[in-house]
Image: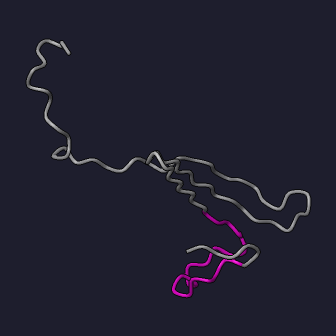
Amino acid sequence: RNLPPGQPIPIFLPAQAFSAGDANVVSIVSDVKLSDNSRFIREAVVRVEQKPKQPATFLAWRSPAARMVMASQIPPPNETMQDGQQ
């Protein structure tokens, strides 16, 4: 869900019992798909602070883990390949 700029992150009421205090840590995922179907996905973990010169501290910047692939989803090797020839 997209939030309008400047709006606070909504509170998730069912998770209030698991509060971590006033850490103000958020996770942001950006998933961009271009017209040629290529994708760029990044996840940032950010601590938001009340410091004018440094309002946010990036704790992590990463590419999400690749999706698990089941062995049954891997195609069999090409039948025409012999002894490493392509």
Quadrant housing the N terminus: bottom right
Left or right? Give the position of 22 relative to 65. Answer: right
Left or right? Give the position of 86 relative to 82. Answer: right
Q: Can you give x and y, in whole percent of width and height, for residue 49 in the image?
A: 81, 66
Instruction: Residue 12: say if magenta.
Output: yes
The residue under the point 71% across, 69% down is: 23
The residue under the point 36% across, 50% down is: 67
Quadrant location of residue 50? Answer: bottom right
- Given residues 27 and 77, the one toward you in this image is 77
User: In this rendering, is residue 69 above or below 47?
Assistant: above
Q: Can you give x and y, in whole percent of width and height, for residue 18 in the image?
A: 56, 79
Q: Can you give x and y, in whole percent of width and height, for residue 39 in the image?
A: 48, 48
The residue stretch that appears in magenta: 8-27
Quadrant location of residue 43? Answer: bottom right
User: In this rendering, is residue 69 above or below 85?
Assistant: below
Quadrant housing the C terminus: top left
User: Furthest residue to the left?
Assistant: 79
The residue under the point 51% across, 50% down is: 34
- Given residues 61 and 22, the one toward you in this image is 61
User: In this rendering, is residue 54 above or below 4?
Assistant: above
